[in-house]
Amino acid sequence: MNTYELKSYVAEGKLNDTLAALYGAENTEKQKARYLSAIGGYEELYGEGKNLRLFSVPGRSEISGNHTDHNHGKVLAASIDLDIIAVAEATDDGVIRIKSAGFPEDSVKIADIKVDPDKFFTSYAVIEGMCDGMAKAGCTVGGFRAYTTSNVFKGSGLSSSAAFEVMVGNILRTLYNNDISDIEIAKIAQYSENVFFGKPCGLMDQMACAVGGFIAIDFADPKNPIVEKPSFDLSAMGYSLCIVDTHGNHADLNDDYASVPAEMKAVAAALGAAVLRDADEKKFMEILPALRESVGDRAILRALHFFAENRRVEAQTEALKAGDVAAFMAGVRASGNSSFKYLQNVYTTKNVSEQGLSLALALTEAYLTGCDKPCACRVHGGGFAGTIQAFVPTEAADGLVALLDPIFGEGATHILKIRQQGAICTL
């Protein structure tokens, strides 16, 4: 379809069933307008085109397994109904051009791709990394042009960067490689972020964005992670997922993030392993006095967090399968407590006067004590600044908004749904 045909298709409601499945029936008209705007953005920049396709990749919310994937741990995550959407078309010029709303266009020549530290932390590097990763995986890499727009707010712990990485892979898959799986796209996205973008991340974010729904992931073998999708309908159980953006300062946090896997791996090395998943927990407890001297107390606390998180993820996954809301919420609270006290990613030691996450947690915990249903809150995502997560009875969600928005800013509290679909071509 060209842009005229595509706009007519969407405007006439022929995409409505897909939109309702992704965003909820009550949001269909809003999303229809959003997709029409994206098609218009493509047309304004690139013309009407001939064979346009539509794409969607969700953001994600981490549930448990905080900062464990990089040490081959177990995680529980879920995709959400905030996403990046794209209008794209294949080209034969060997160039990938992507214009994201609000940002300059990136134009990448596939033949000139190379790792360049001067391009670290740029979307240009992400595109190059996805192309290189897909080529190394034996996939066809061809040119395309795309216009994207996203409502996955940045710095939120909802993985806007991972969603963008997966989107590039999603487009390349649809246009050139229909047989590549969501899991493979997630692995390539991690490669792109590690090697080309310059960030030593794990695989959880990309996997949750690509696969969709509630997912439990075991990274014991990162090349072949075990992915399980426990069936659990959060909305049907009477709950909303609230993400509260405290609008903290994210400047200069790369060292904080990098210190977590580095310190965990230092403990693993002292135990004769490359990562904590391969380390002997019993031996770890036996040599604690020596470890205090060699790696320091914070590294030990972070290792304690790792070992306990693996067990929590297992228990929460079983709770989801059984529909045991109380046990699931207890796991969320325990994971958050461990993240705060042992992992220590609720605020940065570089700026101890700013503790928006701590404040949001304190206020939310106090608010939730008045609920007559099991509920929970915790630090969300990478931490140090950004967002908290709360599982709130649906009837109490508006009250949480009323409490926190005057403190952290209008629109700080987002009431979300868990989305069942991962990276897809919507048309």
Image (cartoon, grey):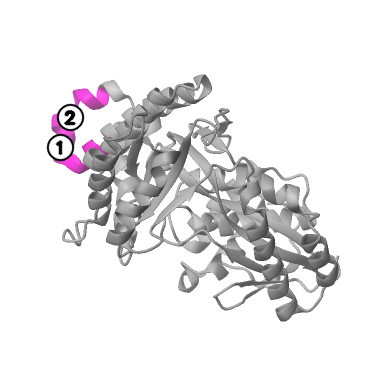
In this rendering, would 223 be left or right of 90? left
Q: Position of residue 397 (x, y in %)?
A: 40, 45
Magenta segment: does it hold 288?
A: yes
The image quarter in which residue 335 lies: top left
The image quarter in which residue 130 lies: bottom right
Residue 17 in sight from this viewpoint: yes
Report crowding for label 2: few under 14, some 14 to 19, many 20 or more residues within 10 A (C-alpha). some
Bounds of the magenta span?
283-303
Above or below: residue 204 compared with residue 229:
below
Magenta segment: does it hold 182?
A: no
Q: Residue at x 78, y 55 (%)?
A: 427
Above or below: residue 381 compared with residue 124:
above
Q: Total number of numbered labels? A: 2
User: Which numbered tag is attached to residue 292?
Assistant: 1
C-alpha gap between disc 2 and disc 1: 6 Å
User: Which numbered tag is attached to residue 288?
Assistant: 2
Q: Amino acid at mark 1?
A: Arg
Q: Amino acid at mark 2?
A: Leu
Question: Which residue occupies the foreground of this view, 152 or 135?
Answer: 152
